[in-house]
Amino acid sequence: MQFFKKIKDVLSTLGERESSLTDEELVEQFVKTGDHEAYYEIWQRHGGYVYNLAYRITSDHHSAEEVSQEVMMQLIQKLDTFKGQSKFSSWLYRVTANASYSFLRQRKKYEKEVGLESYAPYDDNGTLMGKIMPKAWSDRPDSFLFGKESMEIIERAIGELPDSYRVVFVLRDVEGFTNVEVAETLEISVPAVKTRLHRARLALRDKISDYFMEWDKEKK
Amino acid sequence: MSVMCREVVENIIGYIESELDGETLRDLEAHLHECPECLEFVNTYKKMLEMAGKLRERSFVSPEVREKLKKVLQSKLKSSSHLET
């Protein structure tokens, strides 16, 4: 009974207490003593980011919840595998990215994904003539491009990329991973990362252009 | 010109990351100077990357999700081996 009272006490303070320990010290504390308060503190610091990253990669709130729970469980079981060779937050974000990607692969196991291997904005003659300028948007002010509506448009467009391209784009261009980090996290080659990134960016630029044009029509 | 549009597209990463050799860069910039379609392509491509970088600041965690995850955490920790010790 005393033990459960302790858990209750800890839970009641969740969100209120803040430790001055570093992430790495909290991890060590949890691994060595099983101190659940240390674990709560870790999750309190990084749980939001775990969810956000999972959401960006899966593009679905329900899936993001599932991935977050999976990461939560993996951490409890595998925190002792963190060797301190990188910052804990970097390690955790890679665990999350990997869990998100595994989730997508599991979900898509029996579905054939539409690829972007040959996606290109130019025509058969290799020209962009007439394909870009009608949807031009580069001269729009930053207040528009970085405003709420535009951010929602790019989020939506990213969500429409095929999973294997979206995950590379999100890790590289939203989260700022290097090509090598993306390759290691997803267990694919660096050339594969570069290829997917290139096609994802081309497709995304086109999608955003289409969305801006539609948005303009709706506003008129 | 038609060949160069394709080259702009296929070299775009090298171009914005300043990894192109001198000759390719000169040819590409000469083309950009005379092709408004490619210039707009490059400009929107760069803007898109700027916008993507800003997305990291957006959060999707609602109070409901936070509360739900807190309850899950509670239950997972209770059932974990760490708490049995």
Image (cartoon, coloured by chain):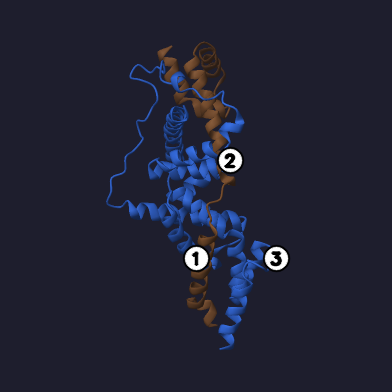
Chain colours: A blue, B brown
In front here: A88 or B79? B79
Q: Residue drawn at (59%, 69%), measured in percent from left and top?
A: A39
Q: Nearer the viewer, mark 3 or mark 1?
A: 1
CB within 8 Å, label 3 to label 1:
no
Q: Look at the numbered disc 2 and give the secondary structure of its residue.
A: helix
- Residue receiving disc 3: A21
- Residue receiving disc 2: B54
Does residue A32 appear in the picture of this structure? no
Sequence-first disc among 1 and 2:
2
Q: Residues within 10 Å of mark 2 (few under 14, many from 20)?
A: some
Q: Look at the numbered disc 1 and give the secondary structure of its residue.
A: helix
CB within 8 Å, label 1 to label 2:
no
Label 3 marks a residue whose chain is A
In front here: A27 or A161? A161
Residue A216: x and y, percent? 47, 28
Q: How crowded is mark 3: few (under 14 residues within 10 Å), some or many (20 or more)?
A: few
Q: Look at the numbered disc 3 and give the secondary structure of its residue.
A: loop
- Residue receiving disc 1: B68
Measure how far apart labels 3 and 1 are at the Cα level: 26 Å
Residue A107: x and y, percent? 34, 54
Q: Which residue lies furthest to the bottom in this view?
A: A1
Measure how far apart labels 1 and 2 are at the Cα level: 27 Å
Measure how far apart labels 3 and 2 are at the Cα level: 29 Å
Q: In which quarter of the image is residue B20?
A: top right
Q: Residue drawn at (48%, 67%), measured in percent from left and top?
A: A73
Q: Residue drawn at (59%, 46%), measured in percent from left and top?
A: B57
